[in-house]
Each structure stands twice: as structure tokens, then as C-alpha cells.
Amino acid sequence: MVKVSRRALLLGGLVWLPIAAVAQGLPTPKDASLYIISPKDGATISGLFWCVFGLRGMGITHASDQFPNSGHHHLLIDVDEPLNSNEPIPQDKKHLHYGSGQTDALIRLSPGQHTLQLVLGDAKHFPFNPPLMSKKITIAIKEPIAAKKVGEVTLPRRPERRQCR
Ligand SMILES: [Cu+2]
């Protein structure tokens, strides 16, 4: 019994290690680029807005789908600390994951200045190597939407996308 358990443990270790290695630091294709289509850098925005994600040279998949040269979007809001490429991208209010393969998102931020930056993550939410990140843009939110009025607000129109691929 003990021998079987040890073999199972060993096998488990052997199987687990390569998967962990594959999930980290997948190479970024040379011609890949990640960018924010909307809003524009320096924009002043009232209330809610659509953030539209742009990607060239790689594909978008769902989180946990391991297709070559593909990943899913992450939006970093007011993040100044560098990402640790040996760890998955954090998941909190400042690090938003779009694991269903979304290419845009409706965002609501408090009034004032904010920075937005995209980073592409692999199936297990690790950044690629080198990390594929967009330029960090700064926007200003002008008019707050009172919490009680959110339900009454007309959502901004989703920007039309032009496929660049
Ligand atoms: Cu993720």
C-alpha cells in the first residue's frame, strides 16, 4: 500500500510539474501588440464608459483554454506596481479578468484621474514572457453617477469595432 501511494505521489509530481511550467512565461510572439482602442489617452469622461480592448498578432480564448499564442484580457486600473511574471495576475478591483474572451467592458470609476492598462494572460492567468502590456493611459472621470441613479441611467452606446486583423 505504501509503495502504491508513493508511486501515485511521484506520478502526481511528474504530471503536475510540466503543466505548471507550461502555464508560466509562455513566449510572446514578436509581432504581438496590445492596445486600448477606447477611451483615448487623456479623455475626459462623464459617468460610465466602454473600454475597448485591441490585440494584434495573438488570439483571444477563454481562461483555462490552452491554445497556442492566445490568452485573455486583463484590465489594470490605477496599478503602479509591476506584475510578477512568476505569479498569476492578481484578481481584485484593480485587476479585472475577462476570462470569457470579452474584448470590451463597461467600466464605472469614481470621479478624478485614473490610469488604465491592459495585460494579456495565459490560460492560468500568468503574464506572457515578456509581458504583453498596452500603453498605460490616463483618463479623467468628470461626473459621478449617484448610486441611487445607476438603475435609471442610460448606458453609453457600445463603440463599434473595426476588425484590424
Ligand atoms: Cu485572468
Image (cartoon, rainbow, N blue to C red):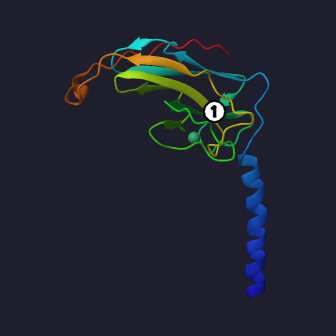
Q: Residues within 10 Å of mark 1 (few under 14, many from 20)?
A: many
Residue at the spot of label 1:
120
Q: In this view of the protein, which residue sits in the foreground, 125 or 80? A: 80
Give the camera-side residue of 136 and 60: 136
Please tell me which residue is depicted at 75% across the width and 40% down the height of the picture: 26
Ligand 1 quadrant? top right
Q: Residue furthest left?
A: 148
Relative to 29, does residue 6 appear above or below in the rendering?
below
| Residue 127 in which image quadrant | top right
Q: Of the residues shown, which amino acid type is indicated by label 1? A: Leu
Percent from the top left, x then y, of residue 24? 72, 46
Looking at the rendered structure, the number of numbered marks drawn on it comes to: 1
Query: Looking at the image, which residue is at 51% across and 25% down?
Result: 116
Q: Quadrant of the N terminus?
A: bottom right
Circle 1: element type = strand
Q: Nearer the viewer, residue 69 or 150?
A: 150
The answer to whether residue 11 is left or right of residue 123 is right
Q: Is residue 67 left or right of residue 145?
A: right
